[in-house]
Structure formats: structure tokens, C-alpha cells
Image: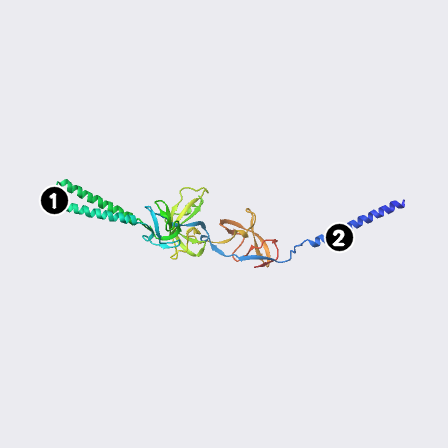
Amino acid sequence: MNWKKIIAIVAGLALMAYAAYVLKSNKEIAQGNVYQFDKEQAISVQADTIHLEHLNDEGFYAGTFEPNKETRISAEIQGKINKILVDIGSTVQRGQALVHLDNTLLKLQLQSIDVQIEGLEADVNRYTILAKADAIQGVQLEKAVLGLKAAKVQRATVVEQINKTTIKAPFNGVVTAKLSEEGAFAAPGVALLQITDISQLKFTANVSENELGKFSLDQTYTLVGDAYPEISLTGKATMVGSKANMGSSFPIQFTVKNTPDMKIKSGMFGKVYLKDGSQEAAIIIESSAIQGTTSQPQVYLIQNGKAVLQQVVVSQRLGNKAVISAGVKEGDVLISGGFINLFDGANVIAQ
């Protein structure tokens, strides 16, 4: 055999062996740099013990509180604003003076009419005496009497205009907008203030056509404001929608009496709870705790320090919660959070 060929073969085999060694070494280094999850390490999770809850406490519909009455106040006559007696946030009573307009010219006009009436009354008295003595024709007395009546009507008109220079509150409420200032010019139709009555509120919720039959007119329901969940309000159903809105849902409106300190404000969100008289108890969990698919829902339970994947049956959805009819029981410990790296059989530590 040619020695050169033997040397070439040996050199090639040596290079291949060296290349294999380098590749193996690089693989071991790369694997050492990659994070290897330790399946035996305990995973920290959030957990809750399952309790039975009443279904009627969970059926609710979201909605918005609105004022019972709200209006923008404007002047009935034109004139300069002399004084605005209230500000935003002021509580007002029905009949309370809110704005004074300048009425100087009207008062001067009233004085002129009073002088005119005084003269006409003297004429009527004088013509009455003369007519009885046949010293004048009766028509002159009639003209004087008619003139006096017209002047009194004119006076009543000016008095009414003067009264309208004081703008008063039409109902009890709170000033929620101030739309003009002193010195500005008021005119009919130009809003000066906005008054809102929140002593009584309207609450409107929208429901689907399948749920419309759950509500009845004149029935009372329990309502809660999102900002004050500890305060329970009573609402009377005053309107059940007969026409769907653009979202294909129907409005249900309730009349609600506010708290004495008016805690519930116009525009706040709230919920109306459906009263069906049922006290049926069921297992209700957060929908976020459900894993798997819609057709095969599953939850993780904690048993002997390990996560156990359990198939369940969801019988009803209530907002962001679900009613479980099979698969878990009262007293089971449910994993409600911390699902990253979680698997069936994993060691867990409950928070």
C-alpha cells in the first residue's frame, strides 16, 4: 500500500474525530446555558377552597344610574344678568331664587302705568258723578272705564315681567353646570344653569330577548352601585323595553331612591340582581380558573401537595363566573391563579 494514501486516510479520520469532539463539546456547553425546568420543583399558585353559594345572589345585570330629573334653566325674558346666586355644586330647593336680571326699566314703566291708572280712576269717578246729573253722555264714562281696565291689564303684564327677572329653581336638586356669568346678556332659550335631581334615580340595564321575561313591571329588585357595593338599594321596574336597541338587547328601567347623603351620582355604574325566590346552592367559580376547551373544561385541584387536573361540567355562565354541576365538590381546593409551567401532577405551594 502507498504510504501517502495511508497517511491521508489517517489524517482524515483524525480530523473527523476532532470535529465530532468539538461538536459534542459545543452541544454540552449550549445545553448548559439553556434553562432546564425542574419538574420536581414546587410551583407557587393561588388557591381557594370551594364553597356552596346561592344562585340567586349571582344573577345580575349591569347598568347605569341616571338622574330622575335634569333641566337647563334659561330666562323667559331678555336682560342683563345682575346676580347669579348659586354655583356648581349648590343644593337648591324648588322656588329658590337663582338669577336676578336687571329690571330697572320695567320698574320705571310700572311707575308710569301707576300714574296713568291714578288719572283714569279720577276720570271714572268724575264722569260717574256727571253722568248721574246728565251733564255728560254715558259713552264718555264707558270709555274712561274701558281705559282704566286696559291700564290695569298693562300693569299686570309689567308686574309679571318684573317677576320673571328673578329666575327660580323648578324643583329640588343640585347645580351641575353654570353656563353664564354676571354681566352677560340673558335671552329666552339661552341656558344659564343646569339643575339635576338625584334624590331619586333611574337605573337602566339592557338584557337579551331570552332574559326579558325575567322582569315584571312594578316589581321591586335589589340594586348595588359599583362604587358602594356595601349599600343595597331597592328599585321598582317602571319600564320594560318593547323595542330592541342597536345591540339587539332590550332596556329595563328602574326607579331608585338615593341614599340620604346622595352617595349615588348620575353616571355611576351598578348592577341589578334578579330575584327569582330560589335559594338553590351551587358551586360557583371564577371563569379564569377553567382550563381546557369549551367542550372539555378542566380545573386544577390541589391534592396531597400536587396539582391534579380534573374534568368538570359547566352548567351556567354568570358574567365572569361559572356554575359547576359536576367534577368538584364543596371543600376541594381549587387553583385559581399561577398556571405558568403548571401541569398535571406538579408539586405546588398554595398562596
Give the Cα separation between the discs numbered 1 and 2: 140 Å
Q: Which of 151 and 9 is in front in this view?
A: 151
Q: In this view, does 144 lie to the left or right of 256?
A: left
Query: Residue at point 72% right, 53% down?
Result: 29
Q: Which of 301 and 38 is in front in this view?
A: 38
Image quarter of the C terminus: bottom right
- Residue 199 visible in rendering: no
Q: Residue furthest left?
A: 133
Is residue 2 toward the left or the right of residue 277 in the image? Answer: right
- As drawn, the label of residue 273 is none
Residue placed most toward the observer, 289 or 326: 289
Give the label on residue 130, or none. 1
Report the residue at 43% width, 44% height from top: 250
Name the amino acid type tagged 2: Ser
Q: Tell me the crowding category of disc 2: few under 14, some 14 to 19, or many 20 or more residues within 10 angstroms, Cα based.
A: few
Please report contact status of discs 1 and 2: CB closer than 8 Å, yes or no: no
Q: Where is residue 69 in the image (x, y as percent from the top left)?
A: 37, 49
Question: Residue 14: x, y in percent?
Answer: 82, 49
Q: List x then y, in percent, for residue 281.
A: 47, 54
Tag nearer the camera, 1 or 2:
1
Residue 58's place in the image compared with 242, above or below, is: below
Q: Which amino acid does label 1 sit on?
A: Leu
| Residue linked to disc 2 | 25
Q: Residues within 10 Å of mark 1 (few under 14, many from 20)?
A: some
Q: Residue at x 52, y 49 (%)?
A: 314
Determine which quarter of the picture holds residue 308.
bottom right
